[in-house]
Image: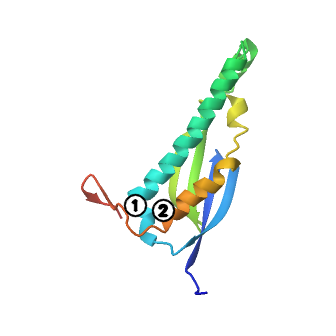
Amino acid sequence: MQNQDITKFEFLLKLENNIVIQRFFNVNNHNPASKTSMDLFECVTDICEEISGDLKSKTLDIMSLQDDFVSPEQRKEEIINYKEENFILEIKQGDRVFICRIFPAHIYHPKVRYAVDIRPKVRKILGDLTSVLSQRELTKNYLGYALR
């Protein structure tokens, strides 16, 4: 068996400064050019959109099950304590973040945003990232500009 080139990466999803999920994964025959490709950008965008879609669906489920989605007392407390919160998705190599996406969390019901569980999808997410990070044919231009 030949010795393959293996590069270690980290997938990290946070709600503000709190870790939601963190996974380390290996990429065989990593292509360094993939870090600045449109392919990686689109892959991470798809991951964020999938997570957002799940959160939206769960929020709608809560709304449909409750006659009073938010009680007047909860609404008053929410207005007093309102704070925009964001999810932060990072892909890292070592300590260096090479792609980061931020998307809103405060738009989802608190029961949903504070109980995010993407574990059933992690295998697919890491597989998609591994595929892109080892891809040889990459899209390296956007609107006629070379990506670096």
Q: Which colour scheme is used?
A: rainbow
Q: Position of residue 110 (x, y in %)?
A: 70, 30
User: Which residue corresponds to mark 1?
Assistant: 37
What residue sits right under mark 2 in the picture? Answer: 132
> Type of residue at label 1?
Ser
Name which residue lies at 63% across and 65% down.
Answer: 25
- Decide: marks 1, 2 in contact (CB < 8 A)? yes
Q: Which residue lies furthest to the bottom in this view?
A: 2
Residue 118 in the image, given as x and y percentages of width and height = 67, 46
Q: How crowded is mark 2: few (under 14 residues within 10 Å), some or many (20 or more)?
A: many
Whether residue 108 is visible, yes or no, is no
Q: Please determine whether, in this image, residue 77 is positioned above or below residue 99.
A: above
Q: Can residue 92 be seen in this view?
A: yes
Percent across and percent down for residue 86 are 59, 40
Q: Which mark is residue 127?
A: none
Q: Nearer the viewer, residue 74 or 41?
A: 41
Q: In which quarter of the image is residue 109?
A: top right
In the displayed orientation, state which residue is furthest to the front.
1
**Regarding mark 2 in the picture, which secondary structure is present there?**
helix
Whether residue 33 sits left or right of residue 101 in the image: it is left
Residue shown at 69%/41% (left/top)? 116
Label 1's element?
loop
- Looking at marks 1 and 2 on the same chain, the residue that comes earlier in the sequence is marked by 1
Q: In this view, does 23 lie to the left or right of 35?
A: right
Q: Quadrant of the C terminus?
A: bottom left
**What crowding class fits label 1: few (fewer than 14 Cα within 10 Å), some (14-19), or many (20 or more)?**
many
